[in-house]
């Protein structure tokens, strides 16, 4: 079985050396001790969420802490291809499903976008919504044993257009697009931005703004996909086309 991964204080990870001990406290320590019920002698991974981590052996377990003696230093490889997914807010758990799956697939950044046709409106609740998304992607990163947690940001339509304008490959998923994504050349390095619309689709004015910014409308499936799955399918295709 793959060693479980927990988040630790970035300062502790930075100072870690083989043989040193890190104490995991707070929610992560409590989860390790009381939910996972780790015991002395078990092997675990710890990460700072920014690409650095360690592997070690649990040496002590208390009510809400564990102590881990470091056996190996870890570092996520730097990938010259950075993929950003702009995910429109969706009703129910669909946004959560989308961002968790894209995290497991290796997305680097996720941008929450309140599209014109988004049923869900964050407005004054944006800070709470972002915090919830950050928790979701952190849990997904731990599940998939990723040392680096995707960054979570918020953008309006104008800001999304700016992201597309600055990308090396800018793509908008659209069910009426004539160009299939799988037929496009994808660079092995640089910045790729994917825009995933809400359940009601991307509004014509939004699509026009994104096209003016240099984006290409692409089709990822012959079927009409939910917003919770469209981004995952697109991300898988982009990574495959880029040789990942």
Image: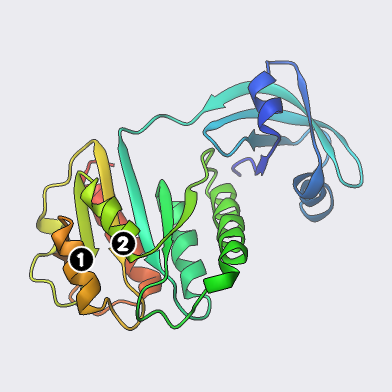
- SS assignment at label 2: helix
- Residue 73: image quadrant is top right
Residue at 29 percent of width and 79 percent of height: 201
Q: Is residue 161 left or right of residue 62?
A: left
Which residue of the protein is positioned furthest toward the right in this rendering? 63
Q: Which residue is mark 1?
A: 209
Dot 2 alpha-carbon crowd within 10 angstroms: few under 14, some 14 to 19, many 20 or more? few
Colour scheme = rainbow
Looking at the figure, which quarter contains the C terminus? top left
In space, the residues marked 1 and 2 are separated at their CA atoms by: 8 Å
- SS assignment at label 1: helix
Q: From this view, report whether residue 147 is shown above or below residue 113.
A: above
The x and y percentages for residue 187 are 18, 41
Residue at 76 percent of width and 18 percent of height: 20
Residue at 36 percent of width and 70 percent of height: 229
Residue at 91 percent of width and 47 percent of height: 63
Q: Earlier in the sequence, mark 1 or mark 2?
A: 2
Q: Is residue 34 left or right of residue 90?
A: right
Dot 1 alpha-carbon crowd within 10 angstroms: few under 14, some 14 to 19, many 20 or more? some
Residue 62 can be seen in this image: yes
The x and y percentages for residue 241 are 19, 48
Q: Is residue 151 left or right of residue 12?
A: left
Residue 52's disc is none
Q: From this view, report whether residue 53 is shown above or below residue 153.
A: above
The x and y percentages for residue 2 are 59, 42
* Callout 1 touching callout 2 (CB < 8 Å): yes
Residue 106 can be seen in this image: no
Q: Which residue is mark 2?
A: 158
Residue nearest the observer in this picture, 123 or 187:
123
């Amino acid at each position: 079985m793959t060693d479980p991964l927990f988040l630790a204080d970035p300062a502790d990870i930075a100072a870690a050396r083989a043989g040193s001990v890190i104490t995991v406290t707070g929610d992560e320590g409590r989860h390790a001790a009381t939910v996972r019920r780790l015991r002395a002698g078990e092997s675990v991974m710890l990460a700072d969420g920014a690409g650095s981590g360690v592997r070690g052996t649990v040496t002590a377990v208390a009510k809400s802490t564990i102590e881990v003696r470091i056996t190996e230093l870890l570092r996520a490889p730097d990938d010259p291809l950075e993929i950003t997914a702009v995910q429109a807010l969706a009703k129910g758990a669909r946004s959560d499903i989308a961002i968790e799956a894209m995290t497991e697939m290796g997305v680097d950044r996720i941008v929450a976008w309140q599209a014109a046709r988004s049923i869900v409106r964050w407005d004054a609740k944006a800070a709470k919504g972002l915090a919830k998304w950050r928790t979701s992607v952190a849990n997904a990163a731990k599940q998939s044993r990723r040392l680096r947690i995707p960054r979570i940001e918020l953008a309006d339509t104008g800001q999304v257009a700016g992201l597309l304008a600055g990308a090396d490959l800018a793509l908008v998923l659209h069910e009426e697009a004539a160009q299939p994504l799988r037929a496009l050349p994808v660079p092995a390095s640089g910045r790729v931005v994917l825009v995933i619309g809400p359940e009601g689709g991307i509004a014509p004015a939004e699509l026009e703004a994104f096209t003016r910014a240099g984006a290409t409308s692409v089709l990822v499936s012959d079927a009409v996909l939910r917003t919770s799955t469209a981004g995952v399918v697109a991300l898988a295709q982009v990574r495959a086309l880029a040789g990942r």
